[in-house]
Amino acid sequence: MWRILGILCLVSAIQGANILYMCPLISPSHHFWNEVLANGLAQRGHNVTILSHDDIRLKHENYTLVKFEGIYEALDGTFDLEDSPKMSTIASMDRLFEGVIAMCSMDLETEGFKQIWNYPKDFKFDLIIWDANGGECMYPLIKRFGNPPVVVVSPFGLQPSISDFMGHHVHSYSPFMIFPFTDKMTFWQRMFNVVYTNYVVYYRKYFFLKKQQQIAKDKFGVDMVDDFQALEKNLSLALVNTDPVYNYPETYPPNIIPVAGIHIQPPKPLNKAFSKIINDSKNGVILFALGSNVKSERINPQILELFGKCFETLPYTILWKIKGGKDLILSKNVITESWIPQNDVLANPKTKLFITHGGALSTQESIYNGVPMLVFPFFYDQLNIAAKIAERKIGDKLDYFSMTPEYVCGKINNILGDERYTRNVKVMSDRARDQQNTPLERGIFWVEYILRHGTAEHLNLVIRNASVFESLNLDIMCFFLAIIVVPLLLIKCYCCKRCKKDKKIKTN
Ligand SMILES: *[C@@H]1O[C@H](CO)[C@@H](O)[C@H](O)[C@H]1NC(C)=O
Ligand SMILES: *[C@@H]1O[C@H](CO)[C@@H](O)[C@H](O)[C@H]1NC(C)=O
Ligand SMILES: *[C@@H]1O[C@H](CO)[C@@H](O)[C@H](O)[C@H]1NC(C)=O
Ligand SMILES: *[C@@H]1O[C@H](CO)[C@@H](O)[C@H](O)[C@H]1NC(C)=O
Ligand SMILES: *[C@@H]1O[C@H](CO)[C@@H](O)[C@H](O)[C@H]1NC(C)=O
Protein backbone atom coordinates (compact mmCIF):
# COMPACT_ATOMS: atom_id res chain seq x y z
CA MET A 1 0.00 0.00 0.00
CA TRP A 2 2.70 2.48 1.06
CA ARG A 3 4.76 1.40 -1.88
CA ILE A 4 1.94 2.20 -4.29
CA LEU A 5 1.38 5.54 -2.62
CA GLY A 6 5.11 6.19 -2.83
CA ILE A 7 5.17 5.44 -6.53
CA LEU A 8 2.13 7.64 -7.09
CA CYS A 9 3.85 10.52 -5.26
CA LEU A 10 6.98 9.98 -7.30
CA VAL A 11 5.11 10.03 -10.57
CA SER A 12 3.13 13.14 -9.71
CA ALA A 13 6.29 14.90 -8.58
CA ILE A 14 7.90 14.12 -11.91
CA GLN A 15 4.92 15.11 -14.02
CA GLY A 16 4.01 18.54 -12.85
CA ALA A 17 6.66 20.06 -10.65
CA ASN A 18 6.70 23.76 -9.92
CA ILE A 19 10.09 25.05 -10.93
CA LEU A 20 11.56 28.51 -10.34
CA TYR A 21 14.22 29.33 -12.91
CA MET A 22 16.54 32.17 -11.86
CA CYS A 23 18.31 33.89 -14.71
CA PRO A 24 19.99 36.82 -12.96
CA LEU A 25 22.85 37.74 -15.32
CA ILE A 26 21.78 40.49 -17.69
CA SER A 27 22.74 38.91 -21.00
CA PRO A 28 20.55 37.89 -23.93
CA SER A 29 22.72 34.86 -24.63
CA HIS A 30 22.42 33.55 -21.06
CA HIS A 31 18.68 34.05 -21.26
CA PHE A 32 18.48 32.21 -24.56
CA TRP A 33 20.50 29.23 -23.29
CA ASN A 34 18.39 29.04 -20.14
CA GLU A 35 15.17 29.34 -22.07
CA VAL A 36 15.94 26.20 -24.05
CA LEU A 37 16.18 24.15 -20.85
CA ALA A 38 13.18 25.91 -19.31
CA ASN A 39 11.13 25.20 -22.40
CA GLY A 40 12.24 21.58 -22.49
CA LEU A 41 11.03 21.22 -18.90
CA ALA A 42 7.72 22.91 -19.69
CA GLN A 43 7.18 20.46 -22.52
CA ARG A 44 7.61 17.67 -20.00
CA GLY A 45 4.62 19.08 -18.12
CA HIS A 46 6.48 21.08 -15.47
CA ASN A 47 5.24 24.51 -14.51
CA VAL A 48 8.28 26.70 -15.05
CA THR A 49 8.47 30.28 -13.78
CA ILE A 50 11.49 32.09 -15.17
CA LEU A 51 12.82 35.26 -13.59
CA SER A 52 14.89 37.14 -16.16
CA HIS A 53 15.67 40.49 -17.78
CA ASP A 54 14.74 39.33 -21.28
CA ASP A 55 11.44 38.55 -22.95
CA ILE A 56 10.34 35.03 -23.79
CA ARG A 57 11.26 33.76 -27.23
CA LEU A 58 10.09 30.17 -26.91
CA LYS A 59 6.46 30.53 -25.85
CA HIS A 60 4.76 27.69 -24.00
CA GLU A 61 1.60 27.46 -21.92
CA ASN A 62 3.43 25.95 -18.91
CA TYR A 63 6.08 28.58 -18.91
CA THR A 64 5.72 32.02 -17.30
CA LEU A 65 8.10 34.96 -17.39
CA VAL A 66 8.46 37.30 -14.46
CA LYS A 67 10.64 40.17 -15.55
CA PHE A 68 13.34 42.16 -13.80
CA GLU A 69 11.99 45.18 -15.61
CA GLY A 70 13.82 48.32 -16.63
CA ILE A 71 17.41 47.19 -15.98
CA TYR A 72 18.55 47.12 -19.62
CA GLU A 73 17.24 50.65 -20.01
CA ALA A 74 18.99 51.80 -16.82
CA LEU A 75 22.29 50.32 -17.94
CA ASP A 76 22.11 51.52 -21.54
CA GLY A 77 25.27 53.33 -22.56
CA THR A 78 27.23 52.55 -19.38
CA PHE A 79 29.34 49.95 -21.16
CA ASP A 80 31.67 50.93 -23.98
CA LEU A 81 32.53 48.01 -26.22
CA GLU A 82 35.63 49.73 -27.55
CA ASP A 83 37.13 49.81 -24.05
CA SER A 84 37.24 46.05 -23.80
CA PRO A 85 40.19 45.16 -26.05
CA LYS A 86 42.27 47.82 -24.28
CA MET A 87 41.51 46.47 -20.82
CA SER A 88 43.69 44.01 -18.95
CA THR A 89 42.17 40.63 -18.11
CA ILE A 90 42.35 41.43 -14.43
CA ALA A 91 40.64 44.79 -14.83
CA SER A 92 37.88 43.24 -16.93
CA MET A 93 37.27 40.56 -14.30
CA ASP A 94 37.04 43.20 -11.56
CA ARG A 95 34.56 45.07 -13.71
CA LEU A 96 32.49 41.91 -14.09
CA PHE A 97 32.37 41.33 -10.31
CA GLU A 98 31.42 44.94 -9.63
CA GLY A 99 28.79 44.87 -12.37
CA VAL A 100 27.19 41.70 -11.00
CA ILE A 101 26.92 43.21 -7.50
CA ALA A 102 25.42 46.45 -8.81
CA MET A 103 22.97 44.53 -10.96
CA CYS A 104 21.87 42.33 -8.08
CA SER A 105 21.04 45.37 -5.92
CA MET A 106 19.03 46.80 -8.80
CA ASP A 107 17.18 43.53 -9.38
CA LEU A 108 16.07 43.45 -5.73
CA GLU A 109 14.13 46.66 -6.27
CA THR A 110 12.26 45.55 -9.39
CA GLU A 111 8.55 44.79 -9.43
CA GLY A 112 9.43 41.38 -10.86
CA PHE A 113 11.44 40.39 -7.83
CA LYS A 114 8.78 41.74 -5.46
CA GLN A 115 6.13 39.77 -7.30
CA ILE A 116 7.96 36.48 -6.70
CA TRP A 117 8.88 37.36 -3.12
CA ASN A 118 5.24 38.17 -2.38
CA TYR A 119 3.84 34.90 -3.72
CA PRO A 120 1.33 33.38 -1.26
CA LYS A 121 3.07 32.04 1.85
CA ASP A 122 2.00 28.48 1.07
CA PHE A 123 3.11 28.56 -2.60
CA LYS A 124 5.57 25.78 -3.16
CA PHE A 125 8.44 25.52 -5.63
CA ASP A 126 9.63 21.91 -5.82
CA LEU A 127 12.96 22.91 -7.29
CA ILE A 128 14.95 26.01 -8.11
CA ILE A 129 17.30 26.30 -11.08
CA TRP A 130 19.91 29.04 -10.71
CA ASP A 131 22.19 30.42 -13.41
CA ALA A 132 25.19 30.68 -11.08
CA ASN A 133 26.70 33.69 -12.80
CA GLY A 134 25.10 36.29 -10.57
CA GLY A 135 22.12 37.16 -8.45
CA GLU A 136 23.70 35.90 -5.22
CA CYS A 137 22.07 38.64 -3.14
CA MET A 138 18.76 36.95 -3.98
CA TYR A 139 19.80 33.61 -2.41
CA PRO A 140 17.27 34.19 0.43
CA LEU A 141 14.60 33.21 -2.15
CA ILE A 142 15.70 29.63 -1.52
CA LYS A 143 14.82 29.90 2.17
CA ARG A 144 11.70 31.89 1.37
CA PHE A 145 10.37 28.87 -0.55
CA GLY A 146 11.31 26.34 2.14
CA ASN A 147 14.79 25.23 0.95
CA PRO A 148 13.85 23.14 -2.08
CA PRO A 149 16.81 21.53 -3.88
CA VAL A 150 18.72 23.88 -6.17
CA VAL A 151 20.25 22.89 -9.51
CA VAL A 152 22.95 25.23 -10.75
CA VAL A 153 23.36 25.94 -14.45
CA SER A 154 26.11 27.83 -16.25
CA PRO A 155 25.84 28.94 -19.87
CA PHE A 156 29.25 30.55 -19.25
CA GLY A 157 31.17 27.27 -19.00
CA LEU A 158 32.73 25.59 -16.01
CA GLN A 159 33.68 28.63 -13.98
CA PRO A 160 36.41 27.96 -11.42
CA SER A 161 34.17 29.20 -8.63
CA ILE A 162 31.40 26.78 -9.61
CA SER A 163 33.96 23.99 -9.70
CA ASP A 164 35.13 25.07 -6.30
CA PHE A 165 31.78 25.09 -4.53
CA MET A 166 30.76 21.82 -6.18
CA GLY A 167 33.86 20.29 -4.60
CA HIS A 168 36.26 20.12 -7.50
CA HIS A 169 39.55 21.94 -7.39
CA VAL A 170 40.68 23.54 -10.58
CA HIS A 171 43.53 21.92 -12.53
CA SER A 172 46.47 23.81 -13.92
CA TYR A 173 45.73 22.40 -17.39
CA SER A 174 42.28 24.03 -17.67
CA PRO A 175 42.91 27.51 -19.05
CA PHE A 176 41.04 30.18 -17.14
CA MET A 177 38.13 31.02 -19.41
CA ILE A 178 39.07 34.62 -20.07
CA PHE A 179 42.76 34.04 -20.88
CA PRO A 180 43.86 33.66 -24.49
CA PHE A 181 45.49 30.32 -23.56
CA THR A 182 44.64 26.81 -24.70
CA ASP A 183 45.19 23.65 -22.65
CA LYS A 184 48.74 23.52 -23.99
CA MET A 185 50.48 26.08 -21.80
CA THR A 186 54.09 26.82 -21.08
CA PHE A 187 55.31 26.52 -17.50
CA TRP A 188 54.88 30.24 -16.90
CA GLN A 189 51.43 30.33 -18.49
CA ARG A 190 50.40 27.46 -16.28
CA MET A 191 51.81 29.23 -13.26
CA PHE A 192 49.92 32.41 -14.11
CA ASN A 193 46.81 30.38 -14.85
CA VAL A 194 46.87 28.61 -11.48
CA VAL A 195 47.64 31.72 -9.47
CA TYR A 196 44.99 33.82 -11.18
CA THR A 197 42.31 31.13 -11.15
CA ASN A 198 42.78 30.69 -7.41
CA TYR A 199 42.79 34.42 -6.90
CA VAL A 200 39.39 34.62 -8.62
CA VAL A 201 38.01 31.74 -6.55
CA TYR A 202 39.14 33.26 -3.26
CA TYR A 203 38.28 36.82 -4.20
CA ARG A 204 34.78 35.68 -5.03
CA LYS A 205 34.44 33.66 -1.85
CA TYR A 206 35.81 36.17 0.64
CA PHE A 207 34.97 39.56 -0.90
CA PHE A 208 32.34 39.29 -3.59
CA LEU A 209 30.14 36.77 -1.81
CA LYS A 210 30.48 38.62 1.50
CA LYS A 211 29.29 41.82 -0.19
CA GLN A 212 26.32 40.02 -1.73
CA GLN A 213 25.52 38.54 1.66
CA GLN A 214 25.61 41.99 3.25
CA ILE A 215 23.23 43.35 0.60
CA ALA A 216 20.88 40.46 1.37
CA LYS A 217 21.11 41.07 5.13
CA ASP A 218 20.30 44.76 4.67
CA LYS A 219 17.32 43.88 2.53
CA PHE A 220 15.82 40.82 4.22
CA GLY A 221 17.18 40.87 7.77
CA VAL A 222 19.67 38.48 9.38
CA ASP A 223 17.10 35.74 9.95
CA MET A 224 16.56 35.17 6.24
CA VAL A 225 20.26 35.07 5.40
CA ASP A 226 22.29 31.92 6.02
CA ASP A 227 26.00 31.85 5.41
CA PHE A 228 26.33 32.00 1.60
CA GLN A 229 29.48 29.88 1.48
CA ALA A 230 27.73 27.06 3.34
CA LEU A 231 24.66 27.56 1.14
CA GLU A 232 26.72 27.10 -2.03
CA LYS A 233 28.21 23.88 -0.67
CA ASN A 234 24.63 22.62 -0.38
CA LEU A 235 23.64 23.28 -4.03
CA SER A 236 22.64 19.96 -5.53
CA LEU A 237 24.03 19.63 -8.99
CA ALA A 238 25.55 21.73 -11.79
CA LEU A 239 24.63 21.56 -15.49
CA VAL A 240 27.42 23.29 -17.34
CA ASN A 241 28.01 24.50 -20.88
CA THR A 242 31.16 22.49 -21.47
CA ASP A 243 32.20 19.08 -22.73
CA PRO A 244 35.35 17.40 -24.04
CA VAL A 245 34.57 18.11 -27.71
CA TYR A 246 33.50 21.76 -27.62
CA ASN A 247 35.87 22.60 -24.80
CA TYR A 248 38.77 20.46 -23.52
CA PRO A 249 38.92 17.05 -21.92
CA GLU A 250 38.74 17.68 -18.18
CA THR A 251 37.75 15.72 -15.11
CA TYR A 252 34.36 16.50 -13.59
CA PRO A 253 33.03 15.12 -10.33
CA PRO A 254 29.71 13.21 -10.63
CA ASN A 255 27.74 16.30 -9.54
CA ILE A 256 28.87 18.34 -12.55
CA ILE A 257 27.07 17.35 -15.75
CA PRO A 258 28.40 18.61 -19.10
CA VAL A 259 25.59 19.76 -21.42
CA ALA A 260 27.40 21.85 -24.04
CA GLY A 261 25.33 22.44 -27.16
CA ILE A 262 22.02 22.23 -25.28
CA HIS A 263 20.80 25.33 -27.14
CA ILE A 264 21.40 24.00 -30.65
CA GLN A 265 18.09 23.44 -32.41
CA PRO A 266 17.51 21.31 -35.50
CA PRO A 267 17.64 23.68 -38.50
CA LYS A 268 14.36 25.09 -39.81
CA PRO A 269 13.87 25.76 -43.53
CA LEU A 270 15.01 29.26 -44.48
CA ASN A 271 12.40 31.77 -45.54
CA LYS A 272 12.18 32.71 -49.21
CA ALA A 273 14.36 35.83 -48.99
CA PHE A 274 17.29 34.14 -47.27
CA SER A 275 16.91 31.01 -49.34
CA LYS A 276 17.15 33.11 -52.50
CA ILE A 277 20.22 35.04 -51.33
CA ILE A 278 22.00 31.78 -50.62
CA ASN A 279 20.86 30.06 -53.84
CA ASP A 280 21.96 33.06 -55.89
CA SER A 281 25.46 33.13 -54.46
CA LYS A 282 27.89 31.65 -56.97
CA ASN A 283 30.76 30.73 -54.70
CA GLY A 284 28.96 30.41 -51.40
CA VAL A 285 28.17 32.62 -48.44
CA ILE A 286 30.18 34.16 -45.63
CA LEU A 287 28.00 34.81 -42.60
CA PHE A 288 29.11 37.83 -40.58
CA ALA A 289 27.15 38.05 -37.33
CA LEU A 290 28.45 39.33 -34.05
CA GLY A 291 26.59 38.49 -30.87
CA SER A 292 23.78 39.97 -28.85
CA ASN A 293 26.24 41.67 -26.46
CA VAL A 294 28.72 42.62 -29.18
CA LYS A 295 26.58 44.16 -31.89
CA SER A 296 28.05 45.26 -35.23
CA GLU A 297 26.34 48.64 -35.00
CA ARG A 298 28.14 49.40 -31.73
CA ILE A 299 31.58 48.94 -33.24
CA ASN A 300 33.82 51.80 -34.30
CA PRO A 301 32.72 52.96 -37.83
CA GLN A 302 36.32 52.79 -39.06
CA ILE A 303 36.36 49.08 -38.34
CA LEU A 304 33.06 48.59 -40.15
CA GLU A 305 34.41 50.46 -43.16
CA LEU A 306 37.50 48.31 -43.17
CA PHE A 307 35.44 45.13 -43.23
CA GLY A 308 33.50 46.61 -46.15
CA LYS A 309 36.71 47.34 -48.07
CA CYS A 310 37.87 43.78 -47.62
CA PHE A 311 34.50 42.31 -48.67
CA GLU A 312 34.65 44.24 -51.97
CA THR A 313 37.53 42.07 -53.11
CA LEU A 314 35.95 38.72 -52.28
CA PRO A 315 34.12 36.44 -54.76
CA TYR A 316 31.61 35.37 -52.06
CA THR A 317 28.24 36.71 -50.93
CA ILE A 318 28.54 38.27 -47.48
CA LEU A 319 25.47 38.09 -45.27
CA TRP A 320 26.02 40.67 -42.53
CA LYS A 321 23.85 41.06 -39.44
CA ILE A 322 23.80 44.76 -38.62
CA LYS A 323 21.16 47.38 -37.84
CA GLY A 324 21.30 50.41 -40.11
CA GLY A 325 23.48 48.62 -42.67
CA LYS A 326 21.82 50.65 -45.43
CA ASP A 327 23.85 53.67 -44.28
CA LEU A 328 27.13 51.95 -45.07
CA ILE A 329 28.69 52.16 -48.51
CA LEU A 330 29.08 48.55 -49.50
CA SER A 331 29.72 46.56 -52.66
CA LYS A 332 26.93 44.53 -54.28
CA ASN A 333 28.04 41.19 -52.85
CA VAL A 334 27.36 42.41 -49.30
CA ILE A 335 23.82 42.03 -47.99
CA THR A 336 22.94 43.52 -44.61
CA GLU A 337 20.01 42.41 -42.48
CA SER A 338 19.03 43.48 -38.99
CA TRP A 339 18.24 39.88 -38.10
CA ILE A 340 19.50 36.59 -39.53
CA PRO A 341 18.43 33.04 -38.56
CA GLN A 342 22.01 32.20 -37.64
CA ASN A 343 21.72 28.50 -36.91
CA ASP A 344 19.68 27.86 -40.08
CA VAL A 345 22.16 29.74 -42.27
CA LEU A 346 25.07 27.86 -40.66
CA ALA A 347 23.29 24.60 -41.41
CA ASN A 348 23.12 25.45 -45.13
CA PRO A 349 25.84 23.64 -47.11
CA LYS A 350 26.61 26.80 -49.11
CA THR A 351 27.81 28.64 -45.99
CA LYS A 352 31.60 28.64 -46.20
CA LEU A 353 32.75 30.75 -43.27
CA PHE A 354 31.38 32.37 -40.14
CA ILE A 355 32.85 35.66 -38.93
CA THR A 356 31.90 35.80 -35.26
CA HIS A 357 32.78 37.58 -32.02
CA GLY A 358 33.59 34.16 -30.54
CA GLY A 359 30.71 33.78 -28.09
CA ALA A 360 30.31 30.28 -26.68
CA LEU A 361 26.85 29.71 -28.16
CA SER A 362 27.66 30.96 -31.66
CA THR A 363 30.91 29.02 -31.96
CA GLN A 364 29.22 25.86 -30.73
CA GLU A 365 26.56 26.25 -33.43
CA SER A 366 29.28 26.70 -36.03
CA ILE A 367 31.17 23.61 -34.86
CA TYR A 368 27.94 21.58 -34.78
CA ASN A 369 27.23 22.61 -38.38
CA GLY A 370 30.82 22.12 -39.54
CA VAL A 371 31.55 25.72 -40.60
CA PRO A 372 35.07 27.17 -40.08
CA MET A 373 35.30 30.48 -38.23
CA LEU A 374 37.14 33.77 -38.20
CA VAL A 375 36.87 35.12 -34.65
CA PHE A 376 36.91 38.82 -33.81
CA PRO A 377 36.97 38.66 -30.00
CA PHE A 378 36.26 41.50 -27.55
CA PHE A 379 36.13 40.27 -23.99
CA TYR A 380 35.86 37.46 -21.43
CA ASP A 381 35.52 33.96 -22.82
CA GLN A 382 35.72 35.24 -26.41
CA LEU A 383 39.51 35.56 -26.07
CA ASN A 384 39.84 32.02 -24.80
CA ILE A 385 37.51 30.62 -27.45
CA ALA A 386 39.40 32.47 -30.21
CA ALA A 387 42.67 30.91 -29.04
CA LYS A 388 41.08 27.46 -29.02
CA ILE A 389 39.70 27.81 -32.54
CA ALA A 390 43.04 28.98 -33.92
CA GLU A 391 44.95 26.23 -32.14
CA ARG A 392 42.63 23.52 -33.44
CA LYS A 393 42.87 24.90 -36.96
CA ILE A 394 39.09 25.09 -37.35
CA GLY A 395 39.49 28.79 -38.02
CA ASP A 396 41.57 31.79 -37.10
CA LYS A 397 41.34 34.92 -34.98
CA LEU A 398 41.67 38.66 -35.58
CA ASP A 399 43.68 41.00 -33.40
CA TYR A 400 41.82 44.24 -32.70
CA PHE A 401 44.99 46.34 -32.96
CA SER A 402 46.17 44.93 -36.31
CA MET A 403 42.98 45.57 -38.27
CA THR A 404 43.39 46.61 -41.94
CA PRO A 405 41.37 45.44 -44.97
CA GLU A 406 44.38 43.44 -46.20
CA TYR A 407 44.86 41.78 -42.82
CA VAL A 408 41.21 40.70 -42.59
CA CYS A 409 41.07 39.52 -46.20
CA GLY A 410 44.36 37.69 -45.82
CA LYS A 411 42.88 35.68 -42.97
CA ILE A 412 39.62 34.96 -44.85
CA ASN A 413 41.42 33.85 -48.01
CA ASN A 414 43.79 31.73 -46.00
CA ILE A 415 40.95 29.82 -44.32
CA LEU A 416 38.93 29.39 -47.50
CA GLY A 417 41.98 28.52 -49.60
CA ASP A 418 43.08 25.71 -47.31
CA GLU A 419 40.64 22.84 -47.08
CA ARG A 420 42.20 21.58 -43.84
CA TYR A 421 40.14 24.10 -41.86
CA THR A 422 36.84 22.82 -43.20
CA ARG A 423 37.95 19.23 -42.84
CA ASN A 424 38.95 19.73 -39.19
CA VAL A 425 35.69 21.40 -38.25
CA LYS A 426 33.66 18.65 -39.98
CA VAL A 427 35.47 16.06 -37.86
CA MET A 428 34.56 18.07 -34.76
CA SER A 429 30.98 18.32 -35.97
CA ASP A 430 30.76 14.53 -36.30
CA ARG A 431 32.11 14.13 -32.78
CA ALA A 432 29.75 16.74 -31.33
CA ARG A 433 26.73 15.01 -32.91
CA ASP A 434 27.67 11.49 -31.91
CA GLN A 435 26.37 11.25 -28.34
CA GLN A 436 24.32 8.76 -26.36
CA ASN A 437 21.57 11.32 -25.86
CA THR A 438 21.14 15.00 -26.66
CA PRO A 439 22.43 17.57 -24.19
CA LEU A 440 18.82 18.71 -23.64
CA GLU A 441 17.66 15.18 -22.79
CA ARG A 442 20.60 14.95 -20.39
CA GLY A 443 19.75 18.28 -18.76
CA ILE A 444 16.10 17.34 -18.32
CA PHE A 445 17.02 13.89 -17.00
CA TRP A 446 19.21 15.36 -14.25
CA VAL A 447 16.70 18.01 -13.22
CA GLU A 448 14.04 15.30 -12.92
CA TYR A 449 16.55 13.08 -11.11
CA ILE A 450 16.80 15.75 -8.42
CA LEU A 451 13.00 16.02 -8.34
CA ARG A 452 12.76 12.27 -7.81
CA HIS A 453 15.51 11.94 -5.22
CA GLY A 454 15.44 15.37 -3.60
CA THR A 455 19.20 15.52 -3.42
CA ALA A 456 22.42 14.48 -5.12
CA GLU A 457 24.41 14.31 -1.91
CA HIS A 458 25.55 10.81 -2.77
CA LEU A 459 27.28 12.22 -5.86
CA ASN A 460 29.44 14.65 -3.92
CA LEU A 461 33.12 13.98 -3.76
CA VAL A 462 33.98 13.58 -0.11
CA ILE A 463 36.45 16.45 -0.50
CA ARG A 464 33.60 18.88 -1.21
CA ASN A 465 33.79 19.86 2.44
CA ALA A 466 37.55 19.48 2.78
CA SER A 467 40.17 22.20 2.85
CA VAL A 468 42.39 22.89 -0.15
CA PHE A 469 45.22 21.26 1.79
CA GLU A 470 43.46 17.95 1.89
CA SER A 471 41.93 18.00 -1.56
CA LEU A 472 45.18 18.85 -3.32
CA ASN A 473 47.16 16.35 -1.21
CA LEU A 474 49.26 19.20 0.14
CA ASP A 475 49.10 17.74 3.64
CA ILE A 476 50.56 14.46 2.39
CA MET A 477 53.27 16.23 0.43
CA CYS A 478 54.15 18.25 3.51
CA PHE A 479 54.36 15.07 5.53
CA PHE A 480 56.75 13.45 3.05
CA LEU A 481 58.74 16.60 2.75
CA ALA A 482 59.07 16.56 6.51
CA ILE A 483 60.16 12.92 6.79
CA ILE A 484 62.72 13.39 4.01
CA VAL A 485 63.99 16.85 4.77
CA VAL A 486 64.14 16.69 8.56
CA PRO A 487 66.41 13.61 8.76
CA LEU A 488 68.61 15.08 6.01
CA LEU A 489 69.00 18.26 8.03
CA LEU A 490 69.78 16.27 11.16
CA ILE A 491 72.41 14.21 9.34
CA LYS A 492 73.94 17.36 7.91
CA CYS A 493 74.16 19.00 11.33
CA TYR A 494 75.67 15.90 12.84
CA CYS A 495 78.26 15.64 10.04
CA CYS A 496 79.18 19.28 10.34
CA LYS A 497 79.77 18.96 14.01
CA ARG A 498 81.98 15.94 13.44
CA CYS A 499 83.83 17.70 10.66
CA LYS A 500 84.57 20.59 12.89
CA LYS A 501 85.70 18.23 15.67
CA ASP A 502 87.96 16.34 13.24
CA LYS A 503 89.46 19.59 11.99
CA LYS A 504 90.10 20.69 15.54
CA ILE A 505 91.85 17.41 16.32
CA LYS A 506 93.91 17.72 13.11
CA THR A 507 94.99 21.30 13.72
CA ASN A 508 95.78 20.43 17.26
C1 LIG B 1 1.28 21.62 -19.30
O1 LIG B 1 1.28 20.91 -18.06
C2 LIG B 1 0.19 20.06 -17.87
C3 LIG B 1 0.20 19.44 -16.48
O2 LIG B 1 1.41 19.61 -15.83
C4 LIG B 1 0.24 18.98 -18.94
O3 LIG B 1 -0.89 18.11 -18.77
C5 LIG B 1 0.19 19.63 -20.32
O4 LIG B 1 0.33 18.65 -21.31
C6 LIG B 1 1.31 20.64 -20.46
N1 LIG B 1 1.15 21.36 -21.70
C7 LIG B 1 1.94 21.19 -22.76
C8 LIG B 1 1.60 21.97 -23.98
O5 LIG B 1 2.93 20.47 -22.73
C1 LIG C 1 2.42 27.85 -12.35
O1 LIG C 1 3.28 28.97 -12.27
C2 LIG C 1 2.61 30.21 -12.28
C3 LIG C 1 3.65 31.31 -12.35
O2 LIG C 1 4.54 31.22 -11.27
C4 LIG C 1 1.72 30.32 -11.05
O3 LIG C 1 1.01 31.54 -11.09
C5 LIG C 1 0.75 29.16 -11.04
O4 LIG C 1 0.00 29.20 -9.85
C6 LIG C 1 1.49 27.85 -11.13
N1 LIG C 1 0.56 26.75 -11.25
C7 LIG C 1 0.44 25.82 -10.33
C8 LIG C 1 -0.55 24.75 -10.61
O5 LIG C 1 1.13 25.79 -9.31
C1 LIG D 1 20.36 21.74 1.77
O1 LIG D 1 19.58 21.35 0.65
C2 LIG D 1 18.53 20.47 0.94
C3 LIG D 1 17.83 20.13 -0.34
O2 LIG D 1 18.71 19.76 -1.34
C4 LIG D 1 17.57 21.06 1.95
O3 LIG D 1 16.59 20.12 2.30
C5 LIG D 1 18.33 21.52 3.18
O4 LIG D 1 17.46 22.21 4.04
C6 LIG D 1 19.47 22.42 2.80
N1 LIG D 1 20.26 22.77 3.96
C7 LIG D 1 20.54 24.03 4.28
C8 LIG D 1 21.35 24.23 5.52
O5 LIG D 1 20.18 24.97 3.60
C1 LIG E 1 16.99 27.19 -53.13
O1 LIG E 1 17.49 25.89 -53.44
C2 LIG E 1 16.88 24.83 -52.72
C3 LIG E 1 17.62 23.54 -53.04
O2 LIG E 1 18.08 23.51 -54.33
C4 LIG E 1 15.39 24.78 -53.06
O3 LIG E 1 14.77 23.75 -52.32
C5 LIG E 1 14.77 26.13 -52.70
O4 LIG E 1 13.41 26.13 -53.08
C6 LIG E 1 15.50 27.26 -53.39
N1 LIG E 1 14.95 28.51 -52.88
C7 LIG E 1 14.51 29.49 -53.69
C8 LIG E 1 13.93 30.70 -53.03
O5 LIG E 1 14.58 29.42 -54.89
C1 LIG F 1 29.37 18.45 3.97
O1 LIG F 1 28.90 19.14 5.10
C2 LIG F 1 27.48 19.25 5.18
C3 LIG F 1 27.11 20.14 6.34
O2 LIG F 1 28.10 20.15 7.31
C4 LIG F 1 26.88 17.86 5.29
O3 LIG F 1 25.47 17.93 5.33
C5 LIG F 1 27.31 17.05 4.07
O4 LIG F 1 26.83 15.71 4.16
C6 LIG F 1 28.82 17.03 3.92
N1 LIG F 1 29.15 16.41 2.64
C7 LIG F 1 30.13 15.53 2.49
C8 LIG F 1 30.32 15.00 1.10
O5 LIG F 1 30.84 15.20 3.41
Image: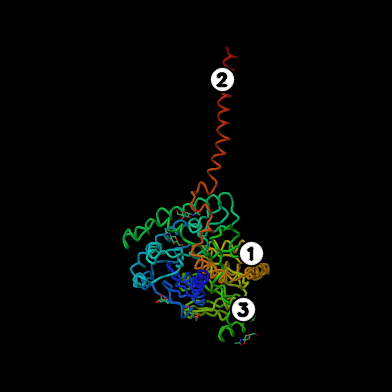
Task: Pick out the residue farthest to the front.
Answer: 1
| Mark 3 lies on residue | 348
Q: Nearer the viewer, residue 416 or 26?
A: 26
**Numbered label attached to residue 393:** 1
Please identify, in this view, whether the residue under mark 1 or under mark 3 is nearer the observer.
3
Under mark 2, the amino acid is Lys
Decide which of 413, 499 is in the foreground and name it.
499
Residue depicted at 40% across the width and 70% down the height: 124
Q: Quadrant of residue 73?
A: bottom left
Residue drawn at (57%, 18%) of the image: 501
Q: Is mark 2 within 8 Å of ligand 5?
A: no
Question: Mark 3 is on which residue type?
Answer: Asn
Percent coordinates x, y for residue 320 in the rendering:
53, 77
Question: Disc 1 to disc 3, how far (Cα)?
Answer: 21 Å
Residue 400 visible to the viewer = no
Q: In percent of the image, x 46 and y 61: which residue is there?
A: 235
User: Does 34 sit above or below residue 251?
Assistant: below
Q: Nearer the viewer, mark 2 or mark 1?
A: 2
To which residue does mark 2 refer?
Answer: 500
In the rendered image, residue 482, in percent from the top left (x then y), is placed at 55, 36
* 288 sits to left or right of 425: left
Query: Between disc 1 and disc 3, whose residue precedes?
Result: 3
